[in-house]
Image (cartoon, rainbow, N blue to C red):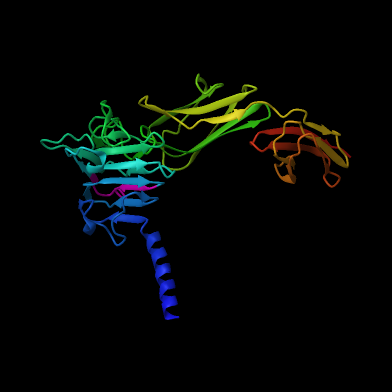
Amino acid sequence: MKKFYLICFAAIFGFIGSTLAQTHTAIFSGNWSDNSIWGPSGPPPNNCNNCTITINDGVDVSIDISFTMLGNSRLLIGSNGAFASSLTIPATSATSISAGHNIILSNGSGGNPTIKIISSLSSLRLTRGPGTTAIYDGVFSRNLPDQVYFKFVGLKPSLIAANGINIASNTPTIYGTSLPNAANPAPFIINSDGTLPVVLTGFNAVLNNLVVDLSWTTSAEINSDHFGIERSINASNWQTIGTVEASGFSSIAVNYSYVDKSPSDNANYYRLKIVDRDGKYKYSPIKVVNGKLTKGLNVFPNPANNFVNVTLGSDMGIGTTIRLINQFGQVLQEKKLSHAAGSTISLPVHNYPQGNYILQVTDEDGSRQTRKLLISR
């Protein structure tokens, strides 16, 4: 029995320890690989997943290994910004990514790892001594599935092949060797999408009657200018159909929306062109919406008294939801149906007061149609 309790205690303690190990704080200056510079939680493990790593105010850390951040891990250079803190990348003459001094932001496990420079007193810099090449040193992103290493802090080259050895592009890096700088003032966020300090956490496109509602959210923005909304009917040739001004600087969630009032009757492909104030840009993931409305949707009688019938079109999907909504947006009735194409559904309305209502039909792909309904006595 004692052994059983000891095993349970060890399991619980191990679980708590693994939870606490997600937060790591450098409290003394020194090399990253030196365990003595880290607080009670110890040094962050390589391939750190969903970790929060903080370099305290007044602390200077040199990265002397190749370190990978996964998931939604965060590296904060500085805590409150009251004193100078820094992360230094000493350049080497390494012959591969794995042997260099670097931080790799990888989206291989999902999420979007980030590095944030807290204030103008904080800094991230690469230093180069005699005989060093700095080819494999700096801050990289590794975006799957192509797995190319994209360097955006450090000296050129800017692209390393998936094997971590071959140079794919010998152009200069985006941000150079020192941040913050005049073009990129603190607070400054670097994320695994590579080139722009904008963290996109959601992008959706839904057919709503004759229009397509697009919405997206950012969790952080630095120096952002605008979003271009681009549409294609073949995912190859794109046209800009609108623009939305960005907030510019934000460390909280910001919601955006745009309505495409003239989608194609067939497939519509949408993407966002995220542009910063320096003219640099990147693209969002692509969303696809079928612009064809459900055939034959009919609501009768209208006006209604005791009941209303909803006849569904022949091309409805496997899952369909019908909602009756009042003028205040409250859902009064909801019916979830399977294989309902071509059927007629009756809804009782005798208990509702006279007035205007909405019948909303949502298909399994999220497309919606609405009809106005008058209940008359």
Q: Is residue 211 above or below residue 114?
A: above
Nearer to the camera, 135 or 52: 135
Q: Is residue 197 above or below residue 78?
A: above
State the count of labels. 0
- The image quarter containing residue 267 is top right
- The image quarter containing residue 113 is top left
Relative to residue 267, is residue 89 drawn left or right?
A: left
Q: Residue at x 81, y 33 (%)?
A: 299
Could you say where residue 82 lies in the image, as x and y percent from the top left? 28, 49
Nearer to the camera, 208 or 247: 208
- The image quarter containing residue 323 is top right
Nearer to the camera, 334 or 18: 18
* Residue 101 in view, yes or no: no
80 is within the stretch colored magenta: yes
Q: Which quadrant, please, contains the C terminus?
A: top right
Nearer to the camera, 235 or 72: 235
Could you say where residue 355 lies in the image, as x and y percent from the top left? 81, 38
Q: Is residue 76 above or below residue 272?
A: below
Which region shows up in magenta? 73-87
Relative to residue 146, is residue 60 drawn left or right?
A: left
Could you say where residue 142 lies in the image, as x and y percent from the top left? 35, 38
